[in-house]
Image (cartoon, grey):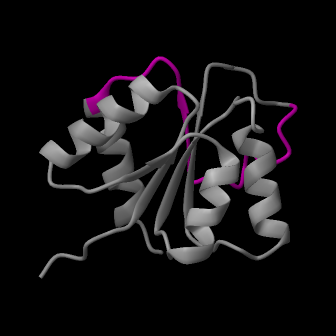
Amino acid sequence: MEKLYKILYIDDEEDLLLLVSGFFRDECLPIDTCLGTDQALEMIKKTKYDLIISDGQMPSGGGSDFFTYLMQEKLYQGKFILLTGEANLSHDPNRHSYDKIILKPFDFISLLRDVQEVLSSKL
């Protein structure tokens, strides 16, 4: 039996959340979504996620800062994918800690393939 992974996708663009969740659902890979890091933090405290996918820049705080917070507070031990429109991440102190960095814009098939690749690597 195949493991059912718990995935959380964080973005401040509601339309993108709906599109990604619909695409993943169609591919039989359920995904929870939320509009920002405040809501994400509440969800992470209640659910053990295998993978978090986070937008790099949001009004509620960027994915890098959120990742740092989760690690410092030991609130999350799973995989983490950062979605960013910024190609130069030399200033990001976490750039070597993410399991994957995906540049925006992305296509859904590539995102799905990247998610499957990250999840198939040892948790």
The residue under the point 31% across, 41% down is: 21
| 78 vs 81: above or below | below
Q: Which quadrant of the figure has residue 42?
A: bottom right
The residue under the point 70% across, 51% down is: 38
Residue 101 lies in the magenta stretch = yes
- Relative to the observer, which residue lies in front, 64 or 33? 33
Question: Residue 101, position in %: x, y?
Answer: 58, 38
The secondary structure making up most of the magenta span is: loop
Question: Residue 87, position in %: x, y?
Answer: 67, 20
Horizontal placement of 113 versus 53: left or right?
left
Number of numbered discs on residues: 0
Name, please, the residue furthest toward the bottom.
1
Question: Residue 109, position in %: x, y?
Answer: 25, 32
Q: Which residues are magenta?
A: 91-108
- Relative to the observer, which residue lies in front, 57 or 101? 57
The residue under the point 81% across, 56% down is: 68
